[in-house]
Image (cartoon, grey):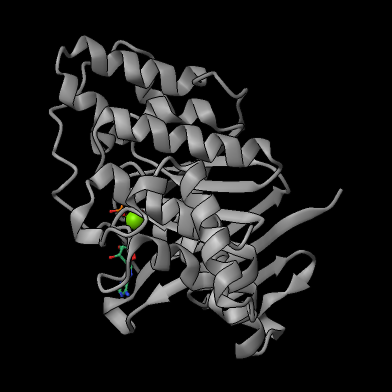
Amino acid sequence: MSFIIEINELSKLYGFGDATTVALDDVTLNIKKGEFIAVMGPSGSGKTTLMNMIGLLDRPTSGDYKINGRKVARFSEYRRARQRRENIGFIFQSFNLLPNLTVLENVAAPLSYKGVRQAKRLKLAAQMLEQVGLRDRDSYYPAQLSGGQLQRAAIARALVNSPSIIIADEPTGNLDSVSARVVMELLSEIHKMGNTVLMVTHNPSLTRYADRIIYMLDGAVVYDEASAVGEIPARVQRAVEALRKSDDDEKLANVSAMMEMMPEKHLGGSTPAEKSKPKKSKKKRGKKKK
Ligand SMILES: Nc1ncnc2c1ncn2[C@@H]1O[C@H](COP(=O)(O)OP(=O)(O)OP(=O)(O)O)[C@@H](O)[C@H]1O
Ligand SMILES: [Mg+2]
């Protein structure tokens, strides 16, 4: 069996001495080509840190990471950058489009490293924009687009290189439900084309697009389960229902509330939904190291 991503006892510590935060705590994780993984967990549990490691945006403190069977620790800086550019597509909640470039230029930007000629770059970018339904906005600037359009443009940019690994960190976090749906359908298409998708989400209902679900808590993977696409696993379902009973729609989208119910013992369905804290209250909960 070959894995596209092999992570072995990976840890990431921030800070020193008493102020050390263990953002990742001995994470071991193997990912097969073509999996769609939903990564869940409360704020501060290490989801973004893990995505940054996988996406070669950051380096672990200890542990092993292999991408396509090759040890990342042995990569030169140049090779890391090339891997990142050519094989990994990033989609962030904050879009990260360059404000001074048009939508078309933004989408074409990742191709400029590849030595693709400009006319070809713009043509490929235009094709990507067509796919995400934004062809008519190609000469707009980011400031002239809606949130949903920005996210679609960001997706077009992430995909223009045909990366085999797509990392999406809360890609629907800032979107209304219709735009979120469009974004999810796009990610789903990418998955069906055989690509590997890693998506951090706080929304339990989005796990139905995934075929595997991972929960993180305090820097560790505490739950890792296969799940049929189209289905929300029983555990997630129970948590969603418990929230629904609480008769507060907002809580449905509220990750923190759900995650507080995530530990097994709370998932019997009889637990009343806890008073939810809005997700905005980003309480950092990294473990302090003694
Ligand atoms: N650059 C940094 N310096 C110091 N601590 C950091 C840094 N980045 C992350 N951390 C800490 O590592 C822990 C994990 O952070 P991370 O961003 O991975 O959480 P997350 O699960 O993505 O949370 P959220 O759902 O809020 O995005 C947190 O306690 C955070 O404060
Ligand atoms: Mg995060």
Find residue 183 and report its image quarter.
Answer: top left
Which residue is situated farthest in the right direction here?
1
Measuring from the top left, give residue 147's x and y in whole percent. Answer: 24, 46
- Can residue 271 be seen? no
- Can residue 243 be seen? yes
Q: 48 or 184, which is in the foreground?
A: 184
163 w.r.t. 116: above or below:
above
* Residue at the (28%, 28%) spot, across then down: 177
Q: 270 or 86, which is in the foreground?
A: 86
Quadrant containing the C terminus is bottom left
Q: 32 or 64, which is in the foreground?
A: 32
* Residue at the (65%, 74%) spot, across then down: 83
Ligand 2, image quadrant it occupies: bottom left
16 w.r.t. 106: above or below:
below
Measuring from the top left, give residue 262's x and y in whole percent. Answer: 37, 31
* Residue at the (18%, 19%) spot, across then down: 249
Judged left or right of residue 64, residue 181 is left
Judged left or right of residue 223, residue 41 is left
Judged left or right of residue 273, residue 108 is right
Judged left or right of residue 176, residue 62 is right
* Residue at the (31%, 61%) spot, across then down: 286
32 w.r.t. 9: above or below:
above
Q: 41 or 105, which is in the foreground?
A: 105
